[in-house]
Structures are given as structure tokens and as C-alpha cells.
Amino acid sequence: MPFNISNEEILETWRMVEVEKLDIRTITMGINILDCRTDDADKTGRAIYDKICLWARDLVKVGEGIERDFGIPIINKRISVTPIAMLVDGFTKEQIIRVGQCLDQAAREVGVNFLGGFTALVHKGYTRGAWELIQAIPETLAATQHVCSSVNVGTTKAGINMDAVYDMGQIIKKTAALTADKDGLGCAKLVVFCNAVNDNPFMAGAFHGPGEPESVLNIGISGPGVVSNVVKNNPDCELGELANRIKNTAFKITRSGELVGRVASSRLGVPFGIVDLSLAPTPAVGDSVAEILEAMGLEQVGTHGTTAALALLNDAVKKGGAMASSYVGGLSGAFIPVSEDAGMIAAAEAGALTLDKLEAMTCVCSVGLDMIAVPGDTPAETLSAIIADEAAIGMINRKTTAVRIIPAPGKKVGDYVEFGGLLGRAPIMPVNPNHSTLFIKRKGRIPAPLQALNN
């Protein structure tokens, strides 16, 4: 195996696991399913089920074996597939829902917790299949447990498809309504992207993109606790030196991730893809990106200076990872999901962290507005406007941005949504009361910026 790791690195990894809560957040197997297309939706669904079960039958077992052999926790084992919209031209919404149910059955059969790829890439417009798939999203997410969905509505090269942005506001509202008994849980499995990447191992946005091989294994690491300890142990060093120390730590974390990825690749007989070195928090104490920022000297995340601190963190993590591996990909940086980060939750509860401040922070972090709960009566057009703002940040800055937002049915500011597990809980955050309806109803396409002509 063309990857060497020293005894010193092994001991360092052991310390990070035992003391600082280092884990591998996910191993995600990408599977090409384009060859599963038939003229019959049910046969297509069955072919997809069979292929997933064939390729991923040992994924969970191999992951558990690596945990035992190396002592590194692997929290999630997941699957991503080719964007389903690429297979379903000519199928109706109802037929596509049945395909989605086959995906769910396959995920359950092989034992993964999530399966991504109920996806449409519509940054310049709709195919018939993409339109029908998007219409099928609410019912599919309501009827399935493991399926995750994503829609890419813009790119730096193409601009922003505002028809799709308008539609996704409606789709999110309907998804929330159909899962109202679970606080709108369906929306936690749905993300709207600008500049979506093809090799993202993290849900809900993972899909096996065009240009990927027949199958591939991508690793998503974590490590907020490790980085937090570095910052806490260096309370007096100036920011440039602090960035260096975070960078060195990200190097070590990434090496551990690549080790796990290459071992899993070898045991499964699937090519190794990338390490996504994003700092992915959980609701557990000590596993928080907000805690890192506060350890830098902020009284509470969301105060003035938060965006600068996050920029330093994100840049240092990327630099350390790029030195550790030639195969860094996915999103790679720092995630700021409100419901999945105990420090973010506390800051939102205290009013220190607002939707507007989160939007500013997305200019310098890995993705965008993530796992944010808003009042259930928030208009669909307001949701679309929030998506449009994030897409504009991504388009202009040539980065991936996304929105995963939950308009919690029947909930208002001061209430909470409770999802449990990795998805956590979140306070309902206020949105700007002024409407954007007339702007959003213009639809059309926001043209690509001038940098789109770089070639």
C-alpha cells in the first residue's frame, strides 16, 4: 500500500483519539448507477438496489474492522450514488418516488445510516427528469429514512437559476409540512447548493458526480476537539503562530484520515478517492467549532471578530491538510451547522448568533447556512431569498455554498426543534420580517460574474 505512517504518528493519533475525541466522521462509498437505467421505473429501482447491495455489502463490516484494528472511531458509513435526475428522464414523479424507496431499501439492507444522491444539477435549467425529481423530493424524504437529497442551483460559470431557487423554497415548505410530526425532519435531509462538488462525502449533499470512477471511497474526517485543545493550550500566542499550530494539527488529522481511507480502499477493492478534512462538529460537549472560535478570545461566537477568527481557522485547516495528502477534496474546512454544534446552539439561544451573522460567516467557511431552524410560517419566497443570497456568495467567490434550513411547522421564535443523534436540536431563529416576494417571483437567471470568463 503506497502510504507510510511512522510509529510516532501512530502514537500521536492514539492520543488524539483517546484524549481529544478525534474520529473519522464518515467513510462514504460512491457508486456509479448510470448502467441501471431501463425503460421501466420499477426495474430501474431494482437494478439500483442490486448494484448498491453488491458493491457496498461489506462497507459496514470493513469499517467496523478498521475501528477494531486501529482504534480510530468511524462514526458513519455512508453511500453516495450518481445524481438520480440523470437516470429518470421520462419517469413520472410517482415513479421517481418508487426509485427513492428502492434507494432506502438498499441503504437499510447494507446497514448504512444515510445514502445521498437523490440529486438534480439544474444550475442552467431543467431537464424533464430533473423537474420531476425535484417535485418528488418532499414525498420521497417523508417516506424514507436514509435517503438524502440535494439540488445545485448555481455555479460561478453558469450563474444562478432563479427558477430553481423559487421552486426550492416551495419544495422546502412542502417537505417540512409532510414531516411536521418530526419537526420538519425531511428538511434536514435536503440541501440546496451553489458550486456543488462531485466528491463530497458529507450528507446531506453527497452524490457520486460525473467524472468519478465506477466506485470510489471518500473519507470525511472531523477533529474539532483536537483543534480546540491546541487553541486552549496556546492562550497567549499571536494569531500567525496560532494559525501555524492549527495547521500542524490539521496535518496530523489528515494523515490519520488518509490511513483509514487507504486501508478501507484496499479491503473493499475500491479505489481511494479523497480526504475531506472539514472540521465537522456534533452536539457532544468538546466537539464544537464554536468552542474553537471562543478559545481564540471571543466571548461568544457571533460577536464582532467571529468572521475573522473563522477565516483564520478555515485557512489553517486547508493548508495543513494540503501538506498532508495529495488527495484532499470534498469541501474541506470548517462546518458551522447550528443544530449539530453545542456552542452554536448556545450562541443562538443567547441571541449572539443571528441569521445575518451566520450568512457573513459563510463567506469564509466550508459551506453555508446549515441546519438552521426558522419559524414554520416563514414564506416560501423568504426561504428562496435566503437560498439566493447564499448562492450569490458562492457564485461570486468561486466557492461552494449551501442552505439546509428547516421551517419547523407550528414553531415560532423561542421554540426548539428536536431531531436527536447527530442532527441534534436547534432554537428557532428569527428571519427578517420584510418580504422578498416580488424579487423572487421575477425568476429567470442571474448571469454569471465576469470571472466566469477565466479560461
Image (cartoon, helix red, strand yellow):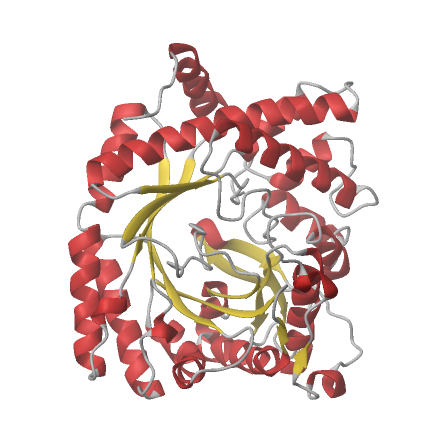
Q: Quadrant of residue 207?
A: bottom left
| Image quarter hosting the C terminus | bottom right
Q: Is residue 351 left or right of residue 42?
A: right
Above or below for 332 versus 134? above
Above or below for 27 versus 208? above
The answer to whether one can see residue 185 in this image is yes
Q: Which residue is drawn at 52% across and 80% down?
A: 171
Q: Residue at x 50, y 80 (%)?
A: 177
Q: Which of 129 and 96 is in front in this view?
A: 129
Above or below for 254 versus 415? above
Total numbered badges shown on the rendered structure? 0
Residue found at the very far top of the displayed protein? 8
Q: Nearer the viewer, residue 216 or 303?
A: 216
Q: Which of 109 and 40 is in front in this view?
A: 40
Above or below for 311 versus 263? below
The answer to whether one can see residue 286 in this image is no
x%, y% of residue 233?
66, 18
x%, y% of residue 95?
28, 84
Q: Is residue 396 left or right of residue 223?
A: right
x%, y% of residue 46?
17, 72
Q: Which residue is drawn at 31% across and 48% down?
A: 216
Q: In which quarter of the image is residue 448?
A: bottom right
Residue found at the very far front of the displayed protein? 455
Q: Is residue 215 left or right of residue 314?
A: left
Q: Residue at x 39, y 61 (%)?
A: 210
| Image quarter hosting the N terminus | top left
Residue found at the very far right of the displayed protein? 304
x%, y% of residue 325?
47, 31
